[in-house]
Image (spheres, helix red, strand yellow):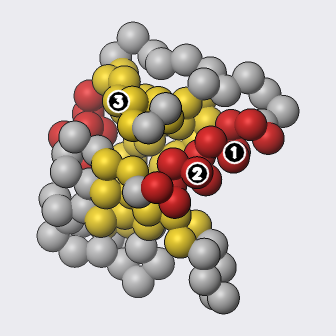
Amino acid sequence: MINLTNSAVNAVKGAISMSPQPASGLRIMVEAGGCAGFKYMMGLADEPKPEDTVIEHDGVKLFVDNKSHEHLAGTTIDFVVALEGSGFTFDNPNAMSSCSCGKSFG
């Protein structure tokens, strides 16, 4: 299961409501790359792909492909507002290491 904090739910709902393109949820993927081996990718999506698992959390739909799901099981996604910048953070229990930017893991 992937969890969203209240702050992340509100950020996604705000992004969906402001999107110029139709969007019904948030696609979350893990791809090879980044400084630590894998990187998180996110973007609004109109509908799930056939290979996606759909997770609904407080009215927000997450679309996660099966390959990425195994890397993300148990992850909590938060949205943090800070002086250095705002953005999503990932608390991933499957990550053996992560880079200082917090956007990639190994």
Can you identify the residue that label 2 sits on?
Answer: 10
Can you identify the residue that label 3 sits on?
Answer: 55
Horizontal side of 92 relative to 17 (left or right) equals left
Which comes sooner in the sequence, label 3 or label 2?
A: 2
Give yes or no for contact between labels 3 and 2 (Cβ–Cβ under 8 Å).
no
Image quadrant occupied by the N terminus: top left
- For label 1, the crowd category at 10 Å Cα-Cα, with few meaning under 14, some 14 to 19 and many 20 or more, is some
Q: Position of residue 98 (x, y in %)?
A: 30, 74
Can you identify the residue that label 1 sits on?
Answer: 15
Q: Residue at x 25, y 61 (%)?
A: 92
Horizontal side of 5 relative to 60 (left or right) equals left
Observer able to see residue 88: no
Q: Is residue 55 above or below residue 41?
A: above
Which comes sooner in the sequence, label 3 or label 1?
A: 1
Q: Residue at x 61, y 53 (%)?
A: 11
Q: Amino acid at mark 1?
A: Ala
